[in-house]
């Protein structure tokens, strides 16, 4: 199962958005490319996973370049190793481990559904592991190990703190001890996170959830409202199927006295996610997956009667007196069916915990040292010495330091100088970067023509980025005569090596220039399979119109949804249009809203139509006028025509012929055929002065 998971997750190592989310998070604590400050605030406190992945990432970095194939393998290996450890913990702890582990794997597979977004972060599976360890140690009343597991786990993800609630069910502890220990665990996490992040010169709230940066934002109901809408929306990707359906099953079957503490932990966990988590990202429920399956597995023998249950207990052959002595007093009975290898689990947990503290601590200290100005200054001095001695890689690295201002003041001129020296000696990365300097005017004047020879040299050495850059220059006629055929050649060379943007651009050339829709579909599919939202949307258009592929509205909707879930406004609008054609207005208006919020003018116009006609919502002329106005002000002709009619007829606003005429005039300039007749009718009831005023306002608008 771990091998299968390796190959499943490997595909998404670079992420699924144009921002490469999975890659960006996984590498955030890399010494060669430290950018922890650029990720979400709530993620910064999940230091252990980020530091762990940063160590693994740096094993791949050679001269600031990353082999994408090796990176993908390391990303998948990281996820699979943690999953293997989780399976090992379950196997050593429980007799019914096969059933539980199969259930865990089935639950994880649901995270690969499009609605989940294909996000795989370095803290999810480790947090699940420590959450499960905390529960297992509590069940055996090894409270010290349970507390240690909770504290270590919460630095992977703060939601592991929920297991500390089990302390209130330690019935041989006094209440003051339970409360004090519970508060102590929370304080260790809050204060520890604050101190650790502060030493990295970053700011983050001691208590944070979701995108809330302070206590006031914690009370914002926005995410809660979105989750309510998501739950109430019927779909095959519904949250009730998360964790292979065990999340709902345990809430139905887990209400027995022996399971009561664990069921309450699950409820508190779900309440927190309901308030602050994105329910469509099903990975957030991963932590309670093993616990849910353990409870369900323990319930399974009960259906066969008391005799079947007693036969599965490890101490079924002991006398009643021995059983009484062997089991610690507890509010639930009987205990879980554990293996005789459970003591080995203690040793394994100590090893996992030790590594989970030592390795991130080592990386943390390395980052602190790396951030010291004198450290970076020493590195620059060493690189300078090597570069002046003719070391081509040192020259390239030194140029990067001057470009980024690492250990030295930002100096584009010096960066350009050292890029040039390294490039002249055949370093393809330096040749590519030198070409970029000419394109962007870094350390030199902008000169597209001067960039061409350097991109060509690097491209001849197999540099994929240079091949793509050549395609861009030829496609847009920058520094060379525009030549789309030549651009296609370079895009194809880069695309064959997996360059996503090159694949998408080549698909566009095949679609728009060659009219070879079948080949366009092939290249769009290559880029779409790697998570390029633009290509996914384009592939959806081909399926919708039956161009180069068999017409298939369902397949079109699938690709539109993928691009929409990655945040592409055009894909969101297309989802709305497909659902509208199917008269599924509730889904349609939701997608139009998402696209409209991103200033997609077509979606704003479509959304206004819904509010004006009362489709899937109550009729609201004020809201309709608002969206028409937003689209009209961006130059959308249909919206300008509609807004003119609203002012002409006084729909939700006071009649205003001057305002109506202005928008009719603007719609006419956009080529809207009905605008001519509307202008004539409007002018018929206006004075000459009013017409002149409206004409002048239209001209002023066009100058903006």
Image (spheres, rainbow, N blue to C red):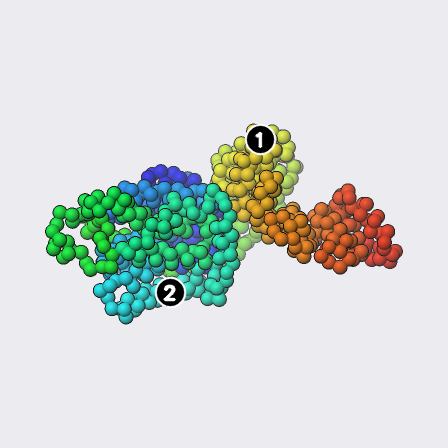
Residue 475: x %, y % from top left: 62, 38
Residue at x-position 80% and y-position 56%: 658
Residue at x-position 33% and y-position 67%: 183
Residue 40: x %, y % from top left: 47, 57
Residue 496: x %, y % from top left: 50, 33
Tell me the element at label 1.
loop
Q: Quadrant of the C terminus?
A: bottom right
Counting the numbered discs, the total is 2
Q: Can residue 600 be seen here?
A: no
Q: Nearer the viewer, mark 2 or mark 1?
A: 1
Q: Residue 485: name its quadrant.
A: top right
Sequence-earlier tag: 2 or 1: 2
Few, some or many C-alpha atoms within 10 Å of disc 2 (few <14, some 14-19, many ≥20)? some
Left or right of 489? Residue 339 is: left
Tell me the element at label 2.
helix
Q: In front: 574, or 396?
A: 574
Q: CA distance from mark 2 to mark 1?
A: 55 Å
The image's mark for residue 551 is 1
Q: Residue 510: name its quadrant.
A: top right
The image's mark for residue 387 is none
Seen in the picture, residue 216 relative to 507 is either above or below; the reply is below
Q: Which residue is mark 2?
A: 190
Residue 41: x %, y % from top left: 46, 59
């Amino acid at each position: 199962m771990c091998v299968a998971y390796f190959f499943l997750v490997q595909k998404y190592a670079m992420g699924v958005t144009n921002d490469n989310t999975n890659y960006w998070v996984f590498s955030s604590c890399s010494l060669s490319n430290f950018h922890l400050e650029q990720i979400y605030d709530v993620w910064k406190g999940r230091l252990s996973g980020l530091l762990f992945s940063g160590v693994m990432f740096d094993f791949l970095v050679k001269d600031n370049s990353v082999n994408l194939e090796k990176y993908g393998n390391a990303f998948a290996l990281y996820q699979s190793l943690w999953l293997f450890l989780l399976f090992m913990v379950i196997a050593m702890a429980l007799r019914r481990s096969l059933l539980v582990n199969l259930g865990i794997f089935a639950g994880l597979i649901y995270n690969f559904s499009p609605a989940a977004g294909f996000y795989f972060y370095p803290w999810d599976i480790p947090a699940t592991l420590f959450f499960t360890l905390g529960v297992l140690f509590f069940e055996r009343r090894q409270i010290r190990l349970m507390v240690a597991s909770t504290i270590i786990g919460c630095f992977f993800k703060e939601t592991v703190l929920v297991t500390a609630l089990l302390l209130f069910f330690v019935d041989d502890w006094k209440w003051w001890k339970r409360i004090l220990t519970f508060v102590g665990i929370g304080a260790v996490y809050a204060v520890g996170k604050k101190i650790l992040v502060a030493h990295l010169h970053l700011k983050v709230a001691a208590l944070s959830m979701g995108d809330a940066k302070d206590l006031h934002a914690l009370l914002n109901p926005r995410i809660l409202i979105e989750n309510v809408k998501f739950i109430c929306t019927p779909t095959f990707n519904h949250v009730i199927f998360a964790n292979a359906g065990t999340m709902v099953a345990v809430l139905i079957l887990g209400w027995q006295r022996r399971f009561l503490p664990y069921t309450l932990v699950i409820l508190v966990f779900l309440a927190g996610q309901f308030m602050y988590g994105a329910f469509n990202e099903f990975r957030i429920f991963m932590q309670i997956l093993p616990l849910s399956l353990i409870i369900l597995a323990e319930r399974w023998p009960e259906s066969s009667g008391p005799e079947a249950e007693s036969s599965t207990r490890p101490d079924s052959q002991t006398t009643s007196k021995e059983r009484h002595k062997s089991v610690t007093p507890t509010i639930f009975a009987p205990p879980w069916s554990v293996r005789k290898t459970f003591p080995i689990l203690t040793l394994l947990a100590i090893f996992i915990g030790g590594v989970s503290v030592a390795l991130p601590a080592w990386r943390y200290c390395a980052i602190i040292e790396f951030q010291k100005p004198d450290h970076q200054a020493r590195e620059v001095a060493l690189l300078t010495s090597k570069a002046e001695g003719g070391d081509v890689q040192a020259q390239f690295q030194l140029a990067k330091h001057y470009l980024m201002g690492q250990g030295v003041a930002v100096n584009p001129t010096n960066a350009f100088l050292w890029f040039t020296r390294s490039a002249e000696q055949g370093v393809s990365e330096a040749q590519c970067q030198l070409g970029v300097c000419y394109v962007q005017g870094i350390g030199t004047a902008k000169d597209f023509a001067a960039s061409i020879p350097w991109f060509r040299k690097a491209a001849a050495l197999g540099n994929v980025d240079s091949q793509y850059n050549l395609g861009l220059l030829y496609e847009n006629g920058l520094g060379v005569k525009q030549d789309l055929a030549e651009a296609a050649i370079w895009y194809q060379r880069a695309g064959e090596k997996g360059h996503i943007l090159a694949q998408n651009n080549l698909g566009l050339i095949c679609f728009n220039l060659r009219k070879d829709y079948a080949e366009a579909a092939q290249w769009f599919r290559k880029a779409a399979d790697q998570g390029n939202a633009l290509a996914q949307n384009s592939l959806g258009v081909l399926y919708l119109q039956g161009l180069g592929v068999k017409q298939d509205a369902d397949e079109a909707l699938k690709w539109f949804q993928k691009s929409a879930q990655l945040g592409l406004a055009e894909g969101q609008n297309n989802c709305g249009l497909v659902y509208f054609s199917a008269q599924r207005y509730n889904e349609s208006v939701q997608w139009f809203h998402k696209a409209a919020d991103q200033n997609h003018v077509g979606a704003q116009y479509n959304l206004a139509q819904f509010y004006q006609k009362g489709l899937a919502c109550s009729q609201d002329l004020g809201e309709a006028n608002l969206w028409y106005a937003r689209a009209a002000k961006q130059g959308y002709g249909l919206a300008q025509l509609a807004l003119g009619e609203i002012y002409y007829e006084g729909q939700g606003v006071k009649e205003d012929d001057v305002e109506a005429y202005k928008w009719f005039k603007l719609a006419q300039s956009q080529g809207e055929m009905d605008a001519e007749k509307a202008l004539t009718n409007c002018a018929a009831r206006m004075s000459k002065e009013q017409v002149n005023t409206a004409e002048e306002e239209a001209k002023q608008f066009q100058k903006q």
